[in-house]
Image: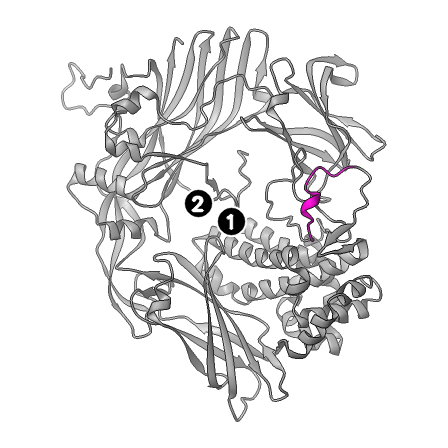
Amino acid sequence: MKSHTSPGVVGRSLSVEDELKGLELDGYKVTFVTKVVLLPVELQPVSEARNSLS
Amino acid sequence: MALARIVEVNPGNSASTIRVDTGSNRFFQWLLGSDRSSTPMGEVIDHVSHRSGMLERVGTGAFQTWFDIEVDPSLVTRDNQFFQLLSFKDAEGTSPAWSSVRSIYLPMATTPDFGTPMNMSRAQGAADQRSRAIAFSADEQPISSAMFWSELSGLLGQLAPLGEDLVSLAGDENVQAGVGGVLEMIGPLLKGLIGAAQAPTPLAQPTFTAPASAVSPAPCVCAPAVVARDPSMAGPRPVGHSGALAVDGGVLTGPMIAGLVGAVAGPVLKALTPLLQKAPEMFETYMDHPVRLIHAISGARRQAEEVTNNRIKQSLSAGERQLLISLLGANGGGGAGVAPFLSGAASVRTRALSSSPIVDARIDAALIPPDDVPGLGRRNLYGRGGDLVFELRLGTALESPDRPIAHVVAHLEFSDADSGEPVLERRIELSDVWLNRSHDLRIDAATAALLPSTKDLNLSVDVLWTGRDAAVYTTPTRAVQQLSVVDDFVVSGFGDRSGESFALTDPTGHRAFWQRIWEGGAPDLNRWELSASTRYYYRIGQSGVGNGRMETKFKLVDDQSRQSDSKVVWGGFLKSGMELDPSELAALTLSRTGISWTPAELDAVAACASPYERQASTSIELRGRTEERGSLWVFPVMAPIEVSLHRVVSVSDRGAVDVLEPIPKPLLLPVDAVFVGMENEG
């Protein structure tokens, strides 16, 4: 399961990768972690959109 | 140019949708088969298992030649996975073109509800049970201004069959009496855009509802269909169909349809002109909300289409019929076939013509909005609990008459600004109405209570009065105003981050914010690979219903996907998102910061006119072997964001909010998205 320990490091906040290290869900193990900044966007109801991924 | 091109493939559980483009070729067939082989002319399908038969493309125009084909998933198996499109100039197979051969088989176990794994469900507390799966209900707004003009020109496209006639007839005194006011306003714009709007003209060529196997393109803002529809024609249109159309018991063919399409220009003009008249105000009001602007325009278009599709004879006002008849007469036979059709309603027409409104191009109606509330700009906020009074002004540039209009009827319609759906209608009668002065339209408190709270509404007012000649008159345009009825709180927007961020890394404690957006594997092959450009959205939804996990949409891209006997590569685009429940955000905020939010305040957050909507884009790659399965999860990094919350302090005797007290406070909202790739060994 996940571990919050970071031996040997004092005063450093844990990164998301550190926090998820060793995490298991449903028998799945973490293979990568990517943090992405959220940007403002304007959404519209899908009925008015083309509902495409282009 | 003749084409046979597969634009994109969207495999699905209920149907696989293939977007294709046939260029100038209007006829097409599609094939499914078990294998493919190369020939000097290109790839062909071997061992065809299904052939669609000859179909004709409908519902598209000269410049929009793509459309969607839906393939029954039961036809697509691992043994019959290859798809090819053939296109032709005519039904006899002239000028054939054929596409490349593509696999449309998706051998992975997608999870349709995208819920969380069972072992997580068992581990969760009661709070997490409020999480729910929802349809992917939002899409990114593309280029707003372009979309606006596209929509507008689409509207004008509806006028195209008649527009030039209208413009050319503007000098005709008889016609001018009926449409002069309208032309005065939109004539120059109509002339300027008419060329661009001409493309998908349905004149004399009926379109049909989306057939089962050859669906029309998704709603396209630039190509609205404006012809009567016959539900019985909803299936694929067989080649050689006569094109005749049954409407209200009558049978319409080419010229008659053309005339009726022209007749619809009247309602369209009526719907369009208030928008144009109010364009500067709308641009100001909607400057930051182009989506709502589009919805307002779409609402107007829907009004016109409703007239067209559902009640064409009944809904054409006598004035519009008169206009149609005048135009048909002046036009000399272009729609002469309509006259007998209309004569079927002769008794209705005669009666209506003697009593229905006549457009008075000299008098305009306008609603005068309340003063802006400091700090909020033009929101036209009204308080809850009292009467609402709207200020109507009938204006004229002519010399004001020496006596008032004795009796005026105002028909008020409140509609949802987002959907355009009517929410309340009221009729108010006024006596002794002077021109160029303001008059009150009062909605009593009990009626006002029927209006939804903290929802942007549009109010439109039709005005009717009786002239000295005993005829009933109306203004050429409706008076319109945007408004919101609020309770105790208003949110005007979201400010800057006011504290440290933290990631919701605990999939148990923060389960309501975690979402598995993809899971799959390929047990029949040696290797599999997922390579997807991924977009994930957050937006704020309704309070008290739980976070909503949007279904995932996955689009395979031909150039990035391939399959051999031993390996499959799924390359394409993946998108999903979460609709955040403000009460879930408030619970998180309380536990983390000790700051509490009331339900009324959270309702105001949910109804904020500048909603908190965010998107994260990244590229994802996952690989696995036969026995392995992969999954992709997303959760947020949260940070306190200053919410511009205001408390309603006072409301005027006309019901308008006139004093607000700013009481900003932080709410935890997502600032980053974390994508987590996982694998197991099956």
Dominant secondary-structure state across the stretch colored magenta:
loop
Say what secondary structure mark 2 lies in. loop
Is the image coloured rainbow, by chain, by secondary structure, or in one colour? one colour
Callout 1: SS: helix
Horizontal side, residue B345 vs residue B140: left or right? right
**Circle 2 is placed at which residue position?**
A42
Q: Position of residue B137 (x, y in %)?
A: 46, 40
**Do marks 2 and 1 both belong to one polypeptide chain?**
no
Marks 2 and 1: CB-CB under 8 Å?
yes
Label 2 neighbour load within 10 Å: few <14, some 14-19, many 20+: many
- What is the quadrant of residue B483 in the picture? bottom left
Residue at 37% of width from left, 17% of height from top?
B678
- Residue at image location 28% in from the left, 20% down from the top: A17
Q: Which residues are magenta?
A: B228-238
Q: Chain of mark 1?
A: B
Instruction: Identify the image quadrant of residue A1.
Output: top left
On-image quarter of the C terminus of chain B: top left
Give me the C-alpha separation between circle 2 and circle 1: 10 Å
From what the image shows, is residue B505 above or below residue B543?
A: above
Camera-side residue: B365 or B54? B54
Q: Nearer the viewer, residue B670 or B92?
A: B92
Give the chain letter at badge 2. A
